[in-house]
Amino acid sequence: TCLLAPVETYLFAVGQTRYGFYRDLARAAWVLPGIPIAWALGGVPAVVWVVALGEIPVMAVLWFGFHRLGCMRWPRELIGPAVFLAGFGLALLFWRATAGYFS
């Protein structure tokens, strides 16, 4: 959500409040069918993943609105997800490197 808050605030400030509704609609379209499917296929861990990844369609909707207004600069907007993925990768490396050390 911290990656999308500035985009959503900007859209709201310039009067594009409908994207708040579209955001919620996209999240519901992802989560409502995803939870029963995930439950049937993988139980609680799969449901957690569906809910956690529920920000992906939200990101698509908000970035679409931002792009329609001519404000989207892809290199700038991709910095946040790139830094997040780099941090996730480093955490995964640390976790693998210390496997068994803390047990």
Image: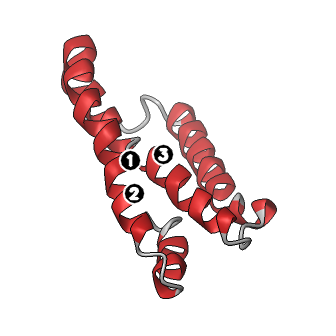
Q: Amino acid at mark 1?
A: Ala
Residue 64: image x %, image y %?
60, 57
Question: Who comes first in sequence, dot 3 or dot 1?
Answer: 1
Colouring scheme applied when the structure was drawn = secondary structure
Local packing at callout 1 (Cα closer than 10 Å; few below 14, some 14-19, many 20+) is some
Q: CA distance from mark 3 to mark 1?
A: 9 Å
Residue 86: image x %, image y %?
66, 50
Camera-nearest residue between 83 and 24: 24
Residue 24: image x %, image y %?
32, 56
Q: CA distance from mark 3 to mark 2?
A: 13 Å
Nearest-to-viewer mark from 3 and 2: 2
Local packing at callout 2 (Cα closer than 10 Å; few below 14, some 14-19, many 20+) is some
Residue at image mark 2:
22
Q: CB under 8 Å between callouts 3 and 1?
A: no
Residue at left 35%, top 43%?
Answer: 52
Q: Amino acid at mark 3?
A: Ile
Marking on residue 95 = none
Camera-nearest residue between 82 and 5: 5
Q: Amino acid at mark 2?
A: Tyr
Secondary element under disc 2, as helix, strand or loop, is helix
Tell whether 55 sits left or right of 6.
Answer: left
Residue at image mark 1:
26
Looking at the rendering, which quadrant does residue 78 occupy? bottom right
Residue at left 77%, top 66%?
Answer: 73
Tell whether 6 sits left or right of 70.
Answer: left
Camera-nearest residue between 35 and 92: 35
Q: CB under 8 Å between callouts 2 and 1?
A: yes
Residue at image mark 3:
56
Secondary element under disc 1, as helix, strand or loop, is helix
